[in-house]
Image (cartoon, rainbow, N blue to C red):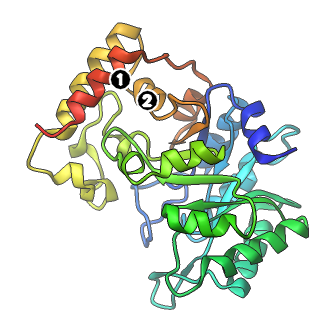
Amino acid sequence: MAIVETLQLTSQHRLGLGTAPLGSIETGPLWWGPQDRVVAVATVRTAAEAGGAFIDTAPFYGWGRAEEIVRDGLLGLKNRPPIFTKCGTHRASNGKPYEDASGDAIRRDVLASRERLAVERIDVVQVHDPDPKIPIEETWSSLMVLRDEGVIGGAGLSNHPVELMDRALTVGPIAVVQHQYSLLHRTPQHDDVLHWCADHAVPFLAWSPLAGGFLTDGFDLSLLHPDDLRRRLRWATRDDDLAERTRSAMTEVAARHGTTMTAVAVAWATRESGMFAILGARSPDEAALLGDPLPTLDGNDIAQLDKANSPA
């Protein structure tokens, strides 16, 4: 079964679990504050049982910690959602991340992920970020070999521009494309990524559709850990009121539909066919939201959200 068919058939609401917060460790590279491992494992299991379309993870999330949490969370499940992980981002001896998407590095990376996840085949492996030193054709060729060997089911691109997506496609099919996308970060609308995915019938995965929590009910920046990465997001430090204007419009839209800001944010990010969203969760209660129905936003809702999100 093709990956596109898998996504369509296993998703009721086109939502998958994002595990970056679950793999968070204080020593980096990402830190969302303390995360209990037992709770993290239960969160993955709840997401799968709630009907999540997929589980999205990466070696970069705690340098393998998130993948091991996914493994334990899915242990024993007969019908698990597809697992998407990533490759190409590595840890240097000084702890800093760097990109190496060469053929040999990709193979080592993918095989290590497969071992941590304890699966025979990883459903989709995405190249985490562009590597300017390595032609995308070399990277994609190595992933196609892994696909032909049955190590992976398909390959995707995360955070890559249209030019590299076009070049990869000349080597082999692209299963998914992933970019940051929310009401506070709309770059994929303006750099043709969304159009490219629609034109090529490639599923688009929006990461951080809740803008790090800024687009959720009751979000309070002051309650975050002092070193929480979300304190450094650009909309957390902007002088204008973009986030507040957007939240205000979302509150009105949510009230009309009798739902939450969270549901409005995710409904907006998945409003078109072929658009999926990666919902980060840190507890079973948050993961259970993957199974909740989403409102259907109409033209007036979209227009109100767009107006609030435009420059003042």
Q: Amino acid at mark 2?
A: Trp
- Rendered position, 215 above or below 37: above
Q: Residue at x 56, y 80 (%)?
A: 90
Circle nearer the N terminus (1, 2) = 2
Please indicate whether residue 255 sits to the left or right of residue 68 in the image: left
Q: Residue at x 53, y 51 (%)?
A: 36
Question: On the image, numbered disc 2 is attached to which residue?
Answer: 268
User: Where residue 136 appears, x then y in whole percent?
Assistant: 61, 76
Please give the residue where the numbered disc 1 appears in the rendered image: 302
Q: Is residue 231 left or right of residue 121?
A: left
**Quadrant where the image shows the N terminus:** top right
Position of 41 relative to 89 (above/below): above
Q: Residue at x 62, y 80 (%)?
A: 101
- Residue 261 lies, in percent from the top left, at 36, 25
Residue 166 shows up from this direction: yes
Real-space Cα separation, disc 1 to disc 2, in angstroms: 8 Å
* Residue 206 location (% of width, % of height): 50, 45
From the viewer's perspective, is 160 left or right of 306?
right
Residue sitting at 78 percent across and 40 percent down? 6
Which mark identifies residue 88? none
Residue type at mark 1 is Ile
As drawn, 145 above or below 241: below
- Check disc 2: other Cα within 10 Å, few if <14, some if 14-19, many if 20+: many
Considering only vertical position in the picture, is 242 above or below 288?
below
